[in-house]
Every structure is written in C-alpha cells, then in structure tokens.
Image (cartoon, rainbow, N blue to C red):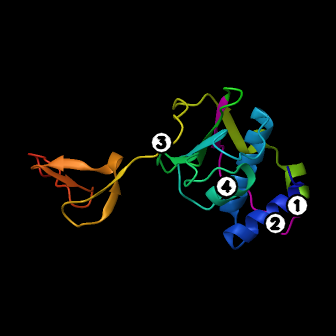
Amino acid sequence: MDDIRTLWERCIDFHGHSCTGLLTGFMAALHASDLLSLRKSEDEGIVCISENDACGIDALQVVLGCTAGRGNLLFHMTGKIAYSFYSRESGHSVRLIARGRIPGLDGMDIVEYCSLHSGEELFEAMDTRIPLPERARIFDSYICDGCGELAGANWMHLQNGKKLCPDCYVKYDRFRI
C-alpha cells in the first residue's frame, strides 16, 4: 500500500477536494485494512457495504479498490457513518461505525493526524450485521415493453404479459397511502 500521505493525496485528487467526509472514509479504510490485513482489491476480494453515500465513499474506492461497477461496493442506506468490510480470502469481516463526528485536519498534515487519531478512537468495531454478499453476477438484458429501453433481467417485472423495467412497472398496492 502507498504511504499515508501519497494515498491521501490520491483520495483528494479523485474526490476533488479535502473535506471531513473524505477523511472519515479514509480513516475507516485504513482502520479496516489494519483489522483485517487488507490490501487493495484487484477484483472482489474485499467487499464494503456502506450505510451512506457521502464523501467518504470516494476514499474507500481509492484505498481499498471497492467500486460499485466492480460489484464490491454496495449500499445499505441507513444514513449512518458505518461501513462493513469483508475479506473473501480470510473470511473475516468487521463493521465500523463512527463514535461521533470525525475531527477535521485543521491544517494538520495527514501523517500527523493519523499519529494523533487512531482508528480505535474514531470508530467502534463490531461484528457485521449483514452476511457476506455473493459475488456480482452478470445478467441478460431485455428491452422494456413500456419504454423500449434496455434493462437487466434482474430488474425486470412481468405485468399483464409484458416485461417492464422498474420505471414502467406499476406496483400493485390496494392501500394507496
């Protein structure tokens, strides 16, 4: 893994600026790496389930190689600053949840910051709540009979003899509240 300063600069370059949200994801990724002995994932060896879609996600992508397109960055939206990390190789996992607001850099160098703020201080480590997701699958695609657009088979619905994408499918609900 790159040295901390280089890795942090790569995160800023990817995200576009330095912010506390990016720092939160950066520190979570470093802490998970320490706890699970992780190295950047080249495939789906590392899986991350994030409970938010905030700035920290960009640091997770840079540091751990978890991306939505690769299928190893998934979202379980709870609005919490929490991330579950899984190592397919070792079978170990950990859920990290922020103990409170992560303090900003306030002009500090990232190496100095990491020496003053440990992962244990910033995050509570606990057992994961969600089992390790299966590897990403590749599905056939079909033309929606409603809008004519292509959609993955796993998203299509059958309704009145037609294959419909989620946008065209009308959910049956007798209680329209």
Sequence-earlier tag: 3 or 4? 4
Sequence-earlier tag: 1 or 4? 1
Mark 1 vs mark 3, CA separation in Å: 36 Å
Residue designated by label 2: 9
18 shown above or below 74: below
Mark 3 vs mark 2, CA separation in Å: 33 Å
Judged by depth in the image, the label closer to the viewer, 1 or 4, is 4
Sequence-earlier tag: 1 or 3? 1
Q: Are marks 2 and 1 in contact (CB under 8 Å)?
A: yes
Q: Position of residue 105 (x, y in %)?
A: 80, 63
Local secondary structure at mark 1: helix
The kind of residue on which mark 1 rests is Arg
Mark 4 vs mark 2, CA separation in Å: 13 Å
Sequence-earlier tag: 3 or 2? 2
Local secondary structure at mark 4: helix
Residue designated by label 1: 5
